[in-house]
Every structure is written in C-alpha cells, then in structure tokens.
Image: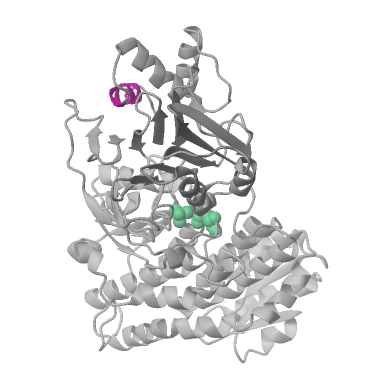
Amino acid sequence: MCGIVAYSGYNEAYPILINGLRRLEYRGYDSAGVALMQDGKITLYKKRGKVSDLDEFCADKNTESHVGIAHTRWATHGEPSEENAHPHLSEDGSIALIHNGIVENYVSLKQELQRIGYTFKSETDTEVLVHLIKDVQAKENLPLADAVMLALTRVEGTYALAILSTDNPDQLIVAKKGSPLLIGVGKNEYFIGSDGAPIVEYTKKVVYLEDGDVAVVTPKKPLVIRNINDEEHLRKRPYFQKLEMSLDQLEKGGFETYMLKEIFEQPKAITDSMRGRINLKKDVVSLGGIIEYESKMMNAKRFIIAACGTSWHAGLVAEYLFESLIRVPVEVEYASEFRYRNPIIHEDDVLIAISQSGETADTLAAVELAKRHGATVIGICNVVGSTLARETMAGSYTHAGPEIGVASTKAFTAQVTVLALMALSLAHKTGTISRSQYHQLVNDLESIPDKIEMVLKQEQFIQKIAQFVATRPNAIFLGRGVNYPVALEGALKLKEISYIHAEGYPAAEMKHGPIALIDEHMPVIVVATEQQTYDKVVSNIQEVIARKGTVISVVTEGDTTVKNMSKFCIEIPHTEELLTPLVATVPLQILAYHVALIRGCNVDRPRNLAKSVSVE
Ligand code: M6R
C-alpha cells in the first residue's frame, strides 16, 4: 500500500529518495514525506498530495544529505494530511520513522503511551511506533536496534519500517513483518525499498527481509540482520539474490500512461508467460515451478482458488478451465471472506492463490490457513521474490513484467494464460481430455498474442464507443459461462478508473433483478462471442432491447445477428470458447481506459486505490 524508500551512502540522498518515491507512487499517493539527516539532526519535509508536490515544496529547501528515509502514503488511519503523512518524529526529534502496514493494537499502545505523558500529533497508528521505540530505548538504555527489537515484540499487526536516528546519523534500522521490504546492496551504500522499483537503477544485488527480521544498515559495513522470533537474537547470514527487474520495464516507453502501455504489452506478456512451457511438438505443457507437486495436483479431490479483485476474476475463468478439462470441483473464494469463515479444508485439497503483487494481505492469510490445514498450496504471481512466492509450496510466475498502472490488465491475461497451461498440463497427464482437444487448445493458446494484436488495432473505434459511455452515469456488463468473469472484469475496470457505476452479471441473471435498471439511458455491454450459450445470450439481448437499453457488444468476427442488434459492435477473432476471456477482456480494458481519459480521470492512479493491498 504505502511505499518506502531509504538510502545511506556517499551519494546525495534526496534525488535518490524522490526518484524512488516517484517509482513507488503507484503503491499510494495521497501524501508524501522525507526525513534527511543533516549535520547530525533530522530535517523533515511532508506534503499532502503527490510526490511532485513534495518535490516542488522542497525545491528551495536545503536537501543536502547522504542519509534519509521517504514515504508515499495510502491512508488507513487518519485522512490524507501533512500531520498524518510519514515520516513521524519522536518528541525530542531524535528518531524519524516510516511505516507500511497496520498496527492492530495501536489503540491500547497509544493509551498506554499517553498515560505516561507522550503526546500525539497525528491520527495514525504509525506514530505509536516511534514513541514506543523511544520509550523502550530510554527506559532500557539500549542501542536503537535492540530497542526496536524489544518494542516490536509488543506490536500486533503488520509492518515494514525504516528508521533514522541521531544516535548513529549514517545508520538505518529496517524491520519487516507482513509487509514487503528489501535492501539493495551497492558499493559502500545501501538502498531500501518496498519493492525493487526504487532500487533497480542502482543495484541488482538485494536481500529480501523475512518476517521478524530487523536489519542494521550502515554504509561500508556488512548488513547485520537478526530476527525477533529468535530468542537469542543471533546474527543471520544475509541471503543475497538478483533483482529480476529492469529499468526499461518501469518506464512508460512512449505511451501516455502506464495503463495503456500495459494493455498494449499483452501480446508480449502472454508470450512471456508461455515461454519454455510448451515444448516444440506441443506434446508437453509443463510448468517447472509445480513439477514437484504435480502428482498432488493430479490427485486433488478439489481445487480452492483464493484471490482478490481482478485476480479473483482470473480464478473464476480457471473454474471453467479446470472443471471442463480436469473434471475436478473448483471453488473460487474471495480471500478476504475465506479466511474468516472457518472453511472446511482437507489434506487432499489444493489451494491455488493468485495475486499480481504477491503481497495482498487477504490472499496471504488464505495461504496460511490452507497450509495450517495440511492442503497443498500453489501460488500464481507476477512479482518475483514476493511474499506469495516465498510462502507457497510451489508455484508459477506469470512473467508479465512489472505492472505499474493500478488497474490490472496484462497481469490478468497472464494469470489466465498460466491457469490455462496448468489445466492443460494436468488434463493431458490425467487423460481427462482427448489428444486432439488438447492439441487444439494448445494451438489456440499459442495464437492468442496475434489475436490480441488484432483487437488492439481497434483502439480508435473503441474510443468512439467510449465517447458514448462516458456520458452515462451507469453501465451493465453481461456475459455467460466463461464470459461471465469477463463481464465482471469489464465492470471493475470501468468503475475503478472512470468512477462510473458499473455492474457485471451473468446475462441470464439479469431478469432476476437488474433488468429493472434498464431504460434508454443504460448502456449494456454484452460479451456475446461464439459459445455454447450463444442463442441464450441473444435472447438476453432481446430483453435489453425491449426495454430500450443501448447494446454494445463484443462478438466473434463475422457475427451478424448480435451486430444488427447493437448500437456498437466490437468484433474479435474466433477463439476456442474456454480461452475467449484472454481476447474478449482486451476491448473492455480499452473501453474503460478511454472513458476514464474522456472524463479527465487519472487512469494510472485512480482515487482511493493502491496497487498492492497489503493491509486487511
Ligand atoms: O496484487 P493482487 O493481484 O493480489 O491484487 C488484487 C486486487 O487488489 C487487484 O486485482 C485490484 O482489484 C485491481 N485494482 C484491479 O484492477
């Protein structure tokens, strides 16, 4: 959610910090702040609004420093304001702290600290941490790192922390539990980030902190990492890894926005998701990351798919793929609901957790729960080295490249690709589909990138449809079968970036309620491609027309029936029914994108949202 960046070394810290915040801004963007160590004292600059507002504010300030911490916020406790923006300072100004996560017991800690005389300047849960650490340090007379370790044993919830202290002006203390944090190792300098984006420009040598780790980061000295769960607090050997990211992937590459770039990257993203996973003769589809657990998957009595948002929609598509091809029951769960409803989980269940970021708190909690019940837990995620990748028993990366736009696009189609590969591989091995059906689907999967290219060519036409939709306050998206999740995804894209109220429904459900909403003002976007239930969808469209609704359709090229019933009709290439979502979702992404642009919305950073939802 929030973004953390910190630096200590021989270079000027401020440009590294502000540049890092810009790269992390997709994680949260309601306020930003920076704390710099200057001549043994901490200077603090904070601003409500974007990182560019903070940078403008700092333009005439003295920002000379070689050590600093910086933060971009997604508000949880307290509205976006300068007081609530991080960093937060101790009362004596000796400690500055930034935090990503939630301190769940902050009310009781705050009351306790207030009783002994601490005053609070903000409404945040984070400010509790800075006073608590200061209090422990003063009472126990401990070096800061030890005080942090002791203080954190009292904290319930999640955190990634970076702390600056006048005790050791060039030192940073960082800690992690439940929220991601990595340390980039340069030559005599260190970089800290919530993810690799603010680090990759400077170094690819990184250490991913583990839950409970507290690290002392001092330039020219080796990292000192200890874990609060280790009673003896012994030093851990840092595990250095290569950051799998390149700077090019983080740039807009000539596109106006990240979202548009990512929509247009889908042919490549899908090709990358398939790379090396389909052998030349197409006889074997295999996902290296799950080989060890393949027999567990082949013998699964049930698949449970847990995810949130767009990833949950990918899970719904997988329900059709898995049930049709493998003939094993699938339950698709909102991770946030699953974790709290005491679900029945058996040892022969396989839970597949899907997440672009690999940091979604609810999805990670579902993983924990399934592991506790002895199920096999498989992950599908995009961010290499993310918590999901580390917490699951096995899994497959989607390899879509970094997705920066808050609205998920290429991650969705890459997730569906990997899920399709998974289903095909298991179905082939268990013999639940014929050889010819298998080959037909594999061939079609390989042709998806070209088919998406054809859809992308229709951008200008879709822009015209967007002119129409942009004037409407509501929209309904309909689809049946495997196109039902496409309708849900189309509606989610439209509402999250254009703020138009949109609902997705299985087309036949319309008559059980939503039909009451249809009149001449209501655009109804129907996915009506060639499919088993095509005729039924045609009847549903008739019902819309009878009530004067305006039909915008997505059909298979050559279709005239639905085309003649539509005000606007987008044609997509013929695709195997089970794989249709990979192609049919794309025009809906483009539609939402242009509607949002027309309405003057910030498509990459829609209001109230954040890219990685690492709080409950
Ligand atoms: O990183 P994840 O895939 O776990 O994120 C899940 C959702 O938060 C995410 O898909 C969200 O719904 C997007 N804003 C959708 O565009």
Left or right? Give the position of 591 relative to 15: right
Residue 163 in the image: state x and y as whole percent.
Answer: 40, 32
Residue 443 in the image: state x and y as whole percent.
Answer: 37, 87
Residue lying at 25% horizontally and 83% vertically, measured from the top left: 279
Q: What predominant SS class does the magenta segment belong to? A: helix
Q: How many marks?
A: 0
Residue 564 in the image: state x and y as whole percent.
Answer: 73, 86
**Region rendered in magenta:** 145-153
Say which quarter of the image contains residue 530. Answer: bottom right
Q: Residue furthest top?
A: 116
Q: Is residue 95 above or below residue 522?
A: above
Residue lying at 52% horizontally and 81% vertically, measured from the top left: 452
Left or right? Give the position of 607 relative to 467: left
Residue lying at 68% horizontally and 77% vertically, measured from the top left: 462
Residue lying at 67% horizontally and 73% vertically, measured from the top left: 540
User: In this orientation, does residue 298 appear?
Assistant: no
Residue 519 in the image: state x and y as whole percent.
Answer: 81, 65
Decide whether residue 553 is among the magenta residues. Answer: no
Q: Is residue 289 above or below residue 173?
A: below
Left or right? Give the position of 294 relative to 494: left
